[in-house]
Amino acid sequence: MARVLILHASVGSGHKRAAEALAAAFARRTPGQVRVEDVLDYTNPIFREAYSHSYLRLTDKLPELWGYVYEQTDRDFFRFATEIRTLVDTTWTWGLRKLLREYAPHVIVCAHFLPVEILSMRKGRARLTQHLYCVVTDYSAHAFWAYRDVDRYFVATEETRRELIERKVPAEVIKVTGIPVHLDVTQPKTREASRASLGYAAEKPLITLFGGGVDPGRVRAIIKGLLQRQLRATLVVVAGRNRGLLNEINDLEGTPHLEMHKLGFINYVDDLVVASDVVVTKAGGLTVSEVLARGRPMIIIDPIPGQEESN
């Protein structure tokens, strides 16, 4: 029985969602075992804390600084930083080597560049014999994604493929497949049935605002602007796990024209997207792909400088 190991890193939610989508597809199509793991769970706690929180803090508090870091590290002049980072990553990820020994996968699929940079280095030194695949979960291939000794890359678009080729990845190992979305997104659903199941009016346009990753003050301003326009519509605001956002908009209520619903974390995102006439969101690679897969119009707001601008 084939054993597949799918690795992601819990830096944002998109990489995990891509990994889970791949796992569901493997489980449906291929007999064997499929295991999804967060590579950061197999690192030193100090490294894990520094790696995940440095990104989240930069993008949340200092997005322009993150944009500068993203741009500078994408240049050839800064490739030496990749070698230093790889050495540090390898030193602090001893738990990953233990996982590989105990699970002994036949195939390793990476949905984040951290496990790729660690494992491609080991593969290049003949310490890793398994096939190593990389699924790029953004629409732009930053230099962080480009490594030698990867058996196959799966990318979103021809443009993504071209960027990897420019970064010296062999063209023959790059396949344009799109970004993986969960199998639920491929199932036929109608706007009418989805609205009925969620209890929203069938006769009014439905606007969904995914605000979990947006500054709460910005979301409040958007809602107030919509309320002032006397739109005859339904507005659904999804805060996700951002409790601060729900507190920020707690005092805002709908009008006789604009019915408003405020939600926290939900497990029926796809049904809500299908029910919508327009989706307002940030530009995470998985969110964009899931909405595109359902053919719903998007208004993309406040992309983080760097990969979200590309998305």
Image (spheres, rainbow, N blue to C red):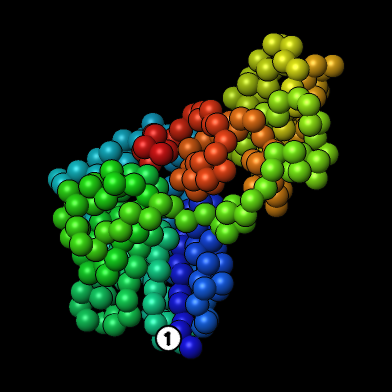
Q: Residue at x 41, y 39 (%)?
A: 311
Report whether residue 134 is seen. Answer: yes
Q: Residue at x 74, y 43 (%)?
A: 194
Front residue (pair 48, 101): 101
- Residue 211 appears left or right of 29: right
Q: What x and y, as percent, mark residue 265?
A: 70, 47
Q: What x and y, as percent, mark residue 153?
A: 31, 61
Look at mark 1 in the image and give the residue it sits on. Answer: 104
Q: Residues within 10 Å of mark 1 (few under 14, many from 20)?
A: some
Corner quadrant of residue 117: bottom left
Q: Vertical placement of 269 versus 225: above or below? A: below
Report whether residue 217 is seen. Answer: no
- Residue 130 appears left or right of 100: left
Q: Residue at x 69, y 43 (%)?
A: 190
Corner quadrant of residue 305: top left
Q: Vertical placement of 183 versus 62: above or below? A: below
- Residue 24 appears left or right of 231: left
Q: Report the number of numbered marks.
A: 1
Q: Amino acid at mark 1?
A: Ala
Q: Residue at x 29, y 53 (%)?
A: 144
Q: What x and y, as percent, mark residue 22?
A: 50, 64
Question: For the view shown, which residue lies furthest in the top direction?
Answer: 229
Is disc 1 placed on a helix, strand or loop? Answer: loop
Q: Vertical placement of 276 versus 104: above or below? A: above
- Residue 109 appears left or right of 271: left
Q: What x and y, as percent, mark residue 135?
A: 38, 59
